[in-house]
Image (spheres, grey):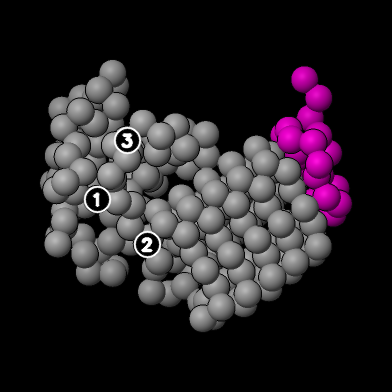
């Protein structure tokens, strides 16, 4: 059985460590990793922080514990092609057998995924997020804590949802869209950008 590395040394990385403790595999974690240009030798929770150049995919799996979808995708493209990314699902998560969750995705404590849902690769479904029936979630999507996605929604890849965002049923959201904290999306978003407010409107530069 391979060891586990966690990319990141911030709050999310430490929360992922707690998730690993809750699923009884934290003893396999050998390091938190940072890119070599920012790395500083230290430890977190008595586990060393190591430069990414030390990562060996033949010995270690990798968890991408960063919340920004663009950064997460860039890391995935940077790491060796043979790297394996475990899918992590907290035992408190409620999901039916008809829910599919892709490689490298992280589903945190208290999340609910009801039925007939597809979640892509390297998605982050943070604490107490609620995703309704028949949703299609793309790759590298981030749901911050407490997001509610109603049924029959289609979420493009690389989207980011701030804490407490609400998405109306039968809504489509374009790839690369950011939805701000507490925003209420009541209509489909076909132009990527940053959306805030109730109802959510695009922020013009």
Left or right, 121 with respect to 195, comes to left
CA distance separating discs 1 and 3: 11 Å
Disc on the earlier residue, 3 or 2: 3
Q: Is residue 191 magenta?
A: yes
Residue 187 in view of the camera: yes
CA distance separating discs 2 and 1: 12 Å
- Which residue was labeled with disc 2? 88
Q: Secondary structure at mark 2?
A: strand
Q: For the stretch drawn in magenta, what is the main secondary structure?
A: loop
- Counting from the top left corner in percent of width and height, residue 204 is at 81, 25
- Counting from the top left corner in percent of width and height, residue 84 is at 29, 51
Left or right, 198 with respect to 120, comes to right
Task: Identify the residue at image location x=73%, y=33%.
Answer: 193
Q: Is residue 134 magenta?
A: no
Task: Identify the residue at image location x=84%, y=54%.
Answer: 186
Task: Identify the residue at image location x=33%, y=52%.
Answer: 85
Contact, mark 2 vs mark 1 (Cβ under 8 Å): no
- The tag on residue 74 is none
- Which residue was labeled with disc 1? 61
Q: Which residues are magenta?
A: 184-205
Q: Secondary structure at mark 1?
A: strand
């Amino acid at each position: 059985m391979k060891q586990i590395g966690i990319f990141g040394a911030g709050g999310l990385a430490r929360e992922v460590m707690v998730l690993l403790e809750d699923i009884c595999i934290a003893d396999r974690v050998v390091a938190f990793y940072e890119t070599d240009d920012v790395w500083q030798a230290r430890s977190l929770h008595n586990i060393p922080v190591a430069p990414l150049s030390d990562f060996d995919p033949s010995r270690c799996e990798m968890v991408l514990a960063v919340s920004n979808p663009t950064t997460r995708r860039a890391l995935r493209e940077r790491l060796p092609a043979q790297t394996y990314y475990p899918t992590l699902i907290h035992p408190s998560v409620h999901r039916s057998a008809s829910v599919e969750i892709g490689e490298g995705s992280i589903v945190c404590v208290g999340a609910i995924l009801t039925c007939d849902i597809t979640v892509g690769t390297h998605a982050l479904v943070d604490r107490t997020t609620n995703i309704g029936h028949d949703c299609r979630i793309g790759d590298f999507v981030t749901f911050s804590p407490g997001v509610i996605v109603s049924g029959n929604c289609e979420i493009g890849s690389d989207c980011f949802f701030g804490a407490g965002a609400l998405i109306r049923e039968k809504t489509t959201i374009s790839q690369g869209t950011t939805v701000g904290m507490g925003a209420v999306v009541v209509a489909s978003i076909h132009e990527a950008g940053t959306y805030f407010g109730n109802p959510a409107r695009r922020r013009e530069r």
